[in-house]
Amino acid sequence: MSKRIALITGATSGIGEGCAKRFADGGYDVIITGRNKEKLDALTTVLEAKGAHVLALAFDVRDREAARRAIEGMPAEWQTIDVLVNNAGLARGLEPEYKGDFDDWDQMIDTNIKGLLTMTRLIVPGMVSRNHGHIINIGSVAGDAAYAGGNVYCATKSAVKAITDGLRIDVADTRLRVTNIKPGLVETNFSNVRFHGDTKRADSVYHGIEPLTGDDIADVVFYAASAPEHVQIAEVLVLATHQANGTVIHREG
Ligand code: NDP
Ligand code: 8X3
């Protein structure tokens, strides 16, 4: 094994799955993580058919000790990660803040902020010691400004921006690069999760507009990773063509 290695969190669906496939197509070996072992196994088969070596690690990013065991327990040849894509994340609910659900808040904060920090803390020291590596965090247009009912989810993605900017400052004396990719409307399992399985409500999010796909975002992630080493793509906002920002969306029909 001597190819470059990308580790993608939340690789079992949507943007993360798209990234796993894009990096495998681009000649990387890939470490895929998520909570669902069966989905990881199915994706492993797909990625191996593309010629990639694959290491699948099933753990919850909210479980710091499980994450530590998984990362520190990787075989030596997998430890030299070139690209970390911190993608695992979710929204839960779209209620006014004063009616929000405490468990939904905890899940978003623990996954989108603390899980991302855990993975960063576990993997970036190795990158610093090798003076090589790229951290790509999946933020959101939701981190630019709050929208109705977005309150805590928007806050987690604002936090991703601050955490990404902070890391970029902290590694400015190294050759590491740090990127925040901020997608707009991407049709994945995201809205099904947000609305707790209410597929009708989830589908309405994408009504009358051609949304982005996970593969569209994966292309942008891979582009950032593929830029020459002296080029650091700090932040990218990626919107569907009829979406102007987090709230202005032109819908037809
Ligand atoms: P999906 O629901 O399709 O995918 C989310 C992924 O995150 C799944 O692989 C899921 O795996 C994983 N995940 C969730 N919670 C955990 C956890 N606690 N531990 C490990 N893995 C976890 O949604 P998307 O692909 O759309 O979302 C990916 C990222 O993109 C998220 O950070 C989201 O906030 C962000 N984003 C999405 C946008 C959109 O419109 N879809 C727009 C902007 C940003 P599993 O549940 O199997 O463990
Ligand atoms: C996901 C995009 O606008 O649904 O982060 O919050 S949005």
Image (spheres, rainbow, N blue to C red):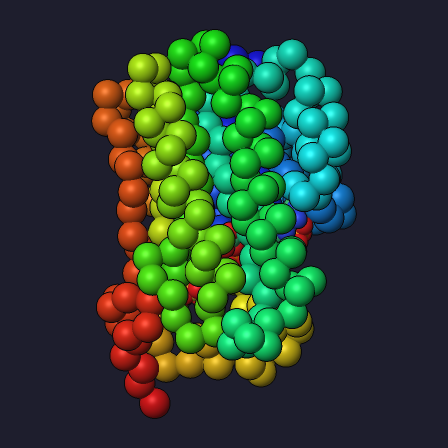
Image spot of residue 21 (x, y percent): 51, 41
Residue 124 seen by the camera? yes
Residue 26 seen by the camera? no
Q: Nearer the viewer, residue 14 or 234?
A: 234
Q: Is residue 29 left or right of residue 226?
A: right
Image spot of residue 160 (x, y percent): 44, 45
* Image quadrant where residue 154 sits: bottom left
Q: Nearer the viewer, residue 89 or 240?
A: 89
Image vertical order of residue 58 relative to residue 93, above or below: above
Q: Residue furthest bottom?
A: 253
Residue for point 29% across, 37% down: 234
* Image quadrant where residue 170 sits: top left
Image vertical order of residue 230 relative to residue 227, above or below: above
Residue for point 65% across, 69% down: 101
Image vertical order of residue 61 relative to residue 102, above or below: above
Image vertical order of residue 185 relative to residue 50, above or below: below
Image spot of residue 61 (x, y percent): 65, 41
Quadrant for the N terminus in the image: top right
Residue for point 55% across, 75% down: 98
All told, the count of numbered labels is: 0
Q: Nearer the viewer, residue 240 or 49?
A: 240
Q: Residue furthest front?
A: 98
Residue for point 69% across, 35% down: 64
Image spot of residue 207 (x, y percent): 42, 81
Quadrant for the C terminus in the image: bottom left
